Amino acid sequence: MEHNGFTLWFTGLSGAGKSTLSTRVADELRRRGVKVEILDGDEVRTNLSKGLGFSKEDRDTNIKRIGYVCKLLTRNGVVAISAAISPYREARDYNRAQIGRFIEIYVECSIEELTRRDVKGLYKKALAGELPNFTGVSDPYEPPLKPEIAVNSGTESVDQSFRRILDYLEQRGWIPKADVPSGAGCGCKH
């Protein structure tokens, strides 16, 4: 089986666990000999989308830029992992259509739980009306209607979510199984 690139698109509210899970998945895929790149929303905003604000148009531009980089990586045999809020369904669907080999992972978590675990106090400020354009509070978040994978960081552990993501990818042949030593007879091109 030839290894082809694909995109794992983690979406969910701020603090839901997208970065934690995407880093864990990336580390495991690398351990299995798969080429991986993570595009974290915060890092992209600093480097690729500097100067963009938080209007719907700017958010869509940011998400489409991430999607374009994921498309380039995917077509070159790399697993691209996006960990960005990506609040609007239309922009995520646009990227799905552009990339093709696209797996949407919805990291769900309630506002109550996000507020409880928020060390920076951003949700508390947003709920008090002190932070405008805060996704999920004063700005919309459109959850995926049919994500390939949905995990809930408020009701399951990181280990449980991580395992469910890997199981999905293994069962569908997207990644080599863990019990096959990387590069030893799996027939994958890494």
Image: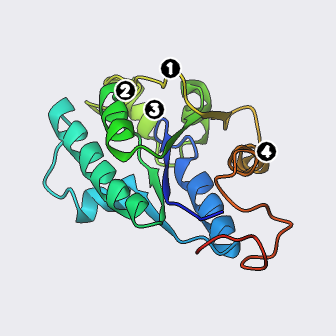
Identify the mark at residue 116; answer none if there is no mark.
none
Disc 4 residue type (three-letter)? Gln
Q: Which residue is mark 4?
A: 160
Measuring from the top left, give residue 120's x and y in whole percent: 46, 48
Residue drawn at x 72%, y 62% as measured from the top left: 176
Distance from label 4 to label 2 (Cα)? 26 Å
Is residue 162 among the parts visible in the rendering?
A: yes
Give the distance between the C-alpha atoms of the residues marked 4 and 1, in whole angstroms.
22 Å
**Quadrant in which residue 60 is drawn:** top left
What is the residue that sits farthest to the bottom in this orientation?
Answer: 184
Disc 2 packing (10 Å; few <14; some 14–19; many ≥20): some
Mark 4 closeness class: few <14, some 14–19, many ≥20 residues within 10 Å = few
Q: Please give the residue where the numbered disc 3 appears in the rendered image.
A: 124
Q: State which mark lies toward you, 4 or 3.
A: 4
Three-letter code, disc 3? Lys
Residue matched to label 1: 145
Q: Split into 4 quadrants, where in the image is the N terminus?
A: bottom right
Q: Earlier in the sequence, mark 1 or mark 2?
A: 2
Rounded to the nearest whole Å, what is the CA distance between mark 1 and mark 2?
Answer: 9 Å
Circle 2 sits on which residue?
89
Mark closer to the chain start, 3 or 1: 3
| Closer mark to the observer between disc 4 and disc 2 | 2
Residue 87 visible to an observer of this rendering: no
